[in-house]
């Protein structure tokens, strides 16, 4: 496509230290924000989350795309969190079994593609099981994000029909794609495995 790209890294120890002046923005450019599992780590720290949103609001991107896990692991009740986690990660591992065969592993060492993915999930599951209180990782559904974004005048916009057509076309190319479920929750796309929600994909705009 011959589009020039430039990669700049901004490092801060806390989002409260982030400032829009740190971004080298060109007024002639169109700004877009993409967050992949970027917000769920901030649920337990409202100050960090609000600081990030204040900066994004000042930057005023033309579009913000958010991909987050679609499961409620924010309950103070351990049994309820455990059941939610069981179904959620059970669907993940079932998907791995179906889509990544043993050839994607390294023969037992755990450093193959599948081993790395399973190790990542194991770390998340361990944290959810052993940590309590403020240290407990918190994951919320798109309904919670809707209410939160509304506080910053950020409103949900729908995915285009062409985007949905592309997703369905790609799924149709894979035999296992028939087990991947696509549902709409309002304007948000919920991607699941055999009916169990896995993640949500939503698009948002800042009102000026």
Image: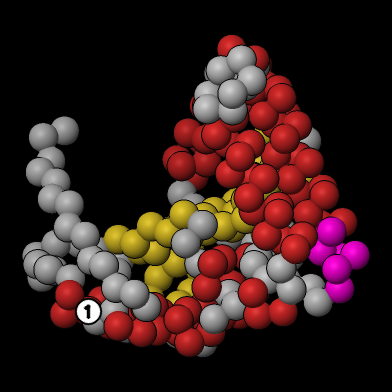
Q: Check the image and report above or below for 195 versus 201.
A: above
- For the C terminus, which image quadrant? bottom left
Residue ranking furthest to the right: 79
Asked whether residue 80 is drawn in magenta, I would say yes
Q: Report the residue at 30% width, 66% height from top.
A: 62
Q: Quadrant of residue 3?
A: top left
For residue 41, side relative to residue 19 (left or right): right
Q: Report the residue at 64% width, 74% height from top.
A: 135
Asked whether residue 129 is drawn in magenta, I would say no
- For the N terminus, which image quadrant? top left
Q: Report the residue at 67% width, 45% height from top.
A: 122
**Colour scheme used in the picture?**
secondary structure
Residue matched to label 1: 20
Q: Check the image and report above or below for 2 versus 21.
A: above
Q: Report the residue at 67% width, 29% height from top.
A: 96
Count residues near mark 1 (Cα–Cα under 10 Å), then give few for <14, some for 14-19, many for 20+.
Answer: some
- One can see residue 201 in this view: yes
Q: Check the image and report above or below for 128 versus 58.
A: above
Segment colored magenta: 77-82
Where's residue 154, x and y in %?
45, 77
For residue 195, side relative to residue 122 (left or right): right
Q: Quadrant of residue 61?
A: bottom left
Q: Check the image and report above or below for 98 versus 94.
A: above
Where's residue 73, x and y in %?
73, 65
Where's residue 132, x and y in %?
74, 73
* Depth order, front residue of 43/129: 129
Residue ranking furthest to the front: 109
Element on which disc 1 rests? helix
Where's residue 40, x and y in %?
56, 66
For residue 104, side relative to residue 27 (left or right): right
- One can see residue 153 in this view: no
């Amino acid at each position: 496509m011959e589009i020039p790209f430039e990669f700049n890294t901004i490092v801060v120890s806390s989002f409260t230290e982030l400032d829009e002046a740190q971004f080298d923005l060109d007024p002639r450019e169109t700004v877009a924000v993409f967050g992949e599992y970027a917000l769920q780590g901030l649920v337990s720290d409202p100050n960090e989350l609000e600081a990030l949103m204040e900066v994004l609001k000042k930057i005023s991107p033309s579009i913000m795309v958010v991909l987050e896990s679609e499961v409620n692991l924010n309950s103070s009740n351990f049994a309820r969190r455990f059941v939610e986690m069981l179904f959620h990660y059970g669907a993940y591992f079932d998907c791995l079994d179906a889509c990544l065969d043993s050839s994607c592993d390294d023969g037992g060492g755990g450093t193959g593609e599948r081993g790395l993915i399973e190790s990542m999930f194991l770390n998340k599951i361990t944290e959810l099981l052993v940590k309590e209180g403020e240290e407990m990782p918190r994951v919320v559904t798109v309904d919670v994000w809707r209410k939160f974004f509304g506080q910053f005048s950020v409103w949900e916009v729908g995915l285009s029909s062409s985007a949905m057509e592309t997703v369905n076309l790609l799924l149709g190319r894979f035999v296992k794609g028939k087990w991947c479920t696509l549902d709409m929750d309002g304007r948000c796309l919920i991607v699941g495995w055999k009916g169990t929600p896995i993640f949500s994909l939503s698009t948002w705009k800042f009102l000026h």
